[in-house]
Amino acid sequence: MILIVDDSPENIISLKKVLEKNDFEVDTASSGEEALKKILKKSYVLIILDVQMPGMDGFEVAEAVSGYSKAKETAIIFLSAATANVNLITRGYSSGGLDYISKPVDMNILLLKVKTFYRIYEQSRALNEMQKALREEIEFRKEAERKKDEFISIASHELKTPMTSIKGYIQLLEKSLDKNDKETIRARLHKVQNQIEKLNVLIADLLDISKIESGKLKFNKQYFSFDNLLEHLIEVMQQSNPQVKIVKKGSVDGNIFGDEMRIEQVIINFITNAIKYGPDGEEIHINSEIRDNELYFSVKDFGIGMSEEHQQKIFEKFYRIEETSERFQGLGIGLYICQEIIDRHKGKIGAHSVLGEGSEFYFQIPLYSEKEEKKQPQL
């Protein structure tokens, strides 16, 4: 938008008419004071400013405008009498003006100057946007590099922990073999097996991340019994964690459509996290039901919970809650993988939590394949 500032109505009318005829948006002010009020409220590409006005003259207006951060990219063209001397022209440039047009105004010259300033403005704005985008891209590279380095450090530590334990137990097993102590051997073999299982989970997560990044995470979707899958998982998880009572609520009759192995992966992650972050001896509640032709599943614990800020980021890749990272192991990729799995099932995943009171993680996915979904009556 262009602002014309002149105390002469005739000048304003003639300039406004020519500029609007050439598709420029125009605003006007009849005094310096009125112009400054408008500049505070609106953004202008160009100000055509009369030098000689009662009250605030054009130079004073220009000096005031130069102090406005809102108008730092606004160009100013002074309108002055043909008799303007060198001192006046010099003052105009020092006040922030970029050009002069003598009165009476040659409209052709005015239009050329206006078009030039508009072109410069557009180029400047495009350059600023490019610079901003480049700065953001550089910051994103830096952040990605930082996260990569952090992840490599965490992964190295997490993989090294079970490997160190396995090495230690094997050394102890060798001593037990010499003594032919079968009970001790059996107990230590069980501990080795647990550490190997942890290693398998870590490696599987790393492979899944690689497949997600390359778009090669495969799914084998078909109809299966969700209740049968859940009953089996609860039985196994309960046996492995006798200190926690797993309470099952609700049921899902019939079969649902999806990748059974991947849905199992999400459920195990939810239950494992609930046991990990809940205090020993507490219950965790598992709920499954049908809602509007969708499977709704949730796992609720009564543990440490998390803040609203963490709830918004918990499904991001490599995200770990700093306060718990020293107490609880993990790569910060389990929930990210879960989100990818549920997204690929056209579903929704989320969490509700209260700091100090516990968390509830949930997902919901369509019961049927997309082809069958279209045939289902809407509830």
Image: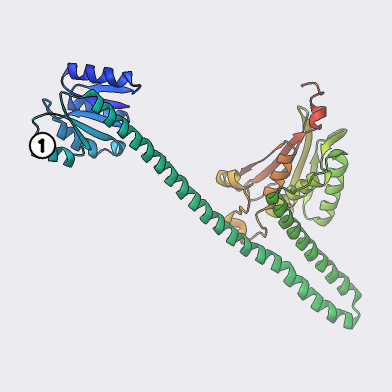
Specify few, some or many for label 1: CA neighbours under 10 Å numbering under 14, 14-19, or 20 or more: some
Q: Position of residue 82 (x, y in %)?
A: 11, 29
On screen, residue 106 versus residue 88, left or right, reads right
| Residue type at tag 1 | Leu
Residue 36 appears in the figure: no
Task: Looking at the picture, tell me which residue is in the foreground, 215 or 111.
Answer: 111
Is residue 233 visible in the rendered image? The answer is yes
- Residue at label 1? 88
Q: Is residue 370 left or right of residue 28?
A: right
Q: Nearer the viewer, residue 120 or 52?
A: 120
Residue 259 drawn at (x, y percent): 81, 42
Q: Which residue is outermost to the bottom?
A: 178
- Outermost front residue: 108
Q: Can you give x and y, in whole percent of width and height, for residue 352 in the image?
A: 64, 40
Q: Residue at x 18, y 40 (%)?
A: 93
- Which quadrant does the N terminus fall into? top left
Question: Quadrant location of residue 160?
Answer: bottom right
Q: Nearer the viewer, residue 279 or 164?
A: 164
Quarter-of-image position of residue 46: top left
Q: Is residue 242 above or below residue 47?
A: below
* On-image quarter of the C terminus: top right
Counting every numbered tag in the picture gives 1
Q: Position of residue 268 (x, y in %)?
A: 77, 49
Q: Residue at x 78, y 65 (%)?
A: 195
Element assignment for label 1: helix
Q: Residue at x 9, y 39 (%)?
A: 86
> How is the protein colored in the picture?
rainbow
